[in-house]
């Protein structure tokens, strides 16, 4: 049992596994943050496009009403 506790075989492999695990966790966190930010940016773009379309539609309707009245 003492040899098992003090043995260092496999230590390098375990370190690589922990390093790979840390990189995977960091990648998932970055992807989650990026995904959330991209979704928010898309929502802002849609809202801005909708507002601009509404304003331009109102102006076009007003111009047409003015032309035909």
Image (spheres, rainbow, N blue to C red):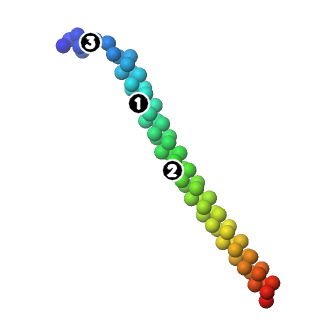
Q: Secondary structure at mark 3?
A: helix
Quadrant containing the C terminus is bottom right
Residue 17 sits in quarter:
top left
Q: Position of residue 28 (x, y in %)?
A: 46, 39
Farthest residue in the right direction?
67
Q: Secondary structure at mark 2?
A: helix
Q: Secondary structure at mark 1?
A: helix
Determine whether, in the image, residue 49 is placed left or right of residue 14. Answer: right
| Mark 1 vs mark 3, CA separation in Å | 25 Å
The residue tagged 1 is 21
Mark closer to the chain start, 3 or 2: 3
Mark 2: few/some/many CA within 10 Å (<14, 14-19, 20+): few
The residue tagged 2 is 36
Mark closer to the chain start, 1 or 2: 1
Mark closer to the chain start, 1 or 3: 3
Q: Position of residue 53 (x, y in %)?
A: 67, 69
């Amino acid at each position: 049992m003492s040899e098992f506790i003090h043995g260092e075989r496999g230590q390098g492999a375990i370190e690589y596994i922990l390093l790979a695990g840390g990189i995977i966790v960091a990648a998932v966190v970055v992807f989650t943050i990026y995904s959330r930010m991209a979704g928010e940016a898309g929502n802002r773009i849609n809202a801005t496009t909708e507002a601009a379309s509404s304003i331009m539609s109102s102006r076009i309707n007003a111009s047409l009403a003015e032309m035909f009245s």
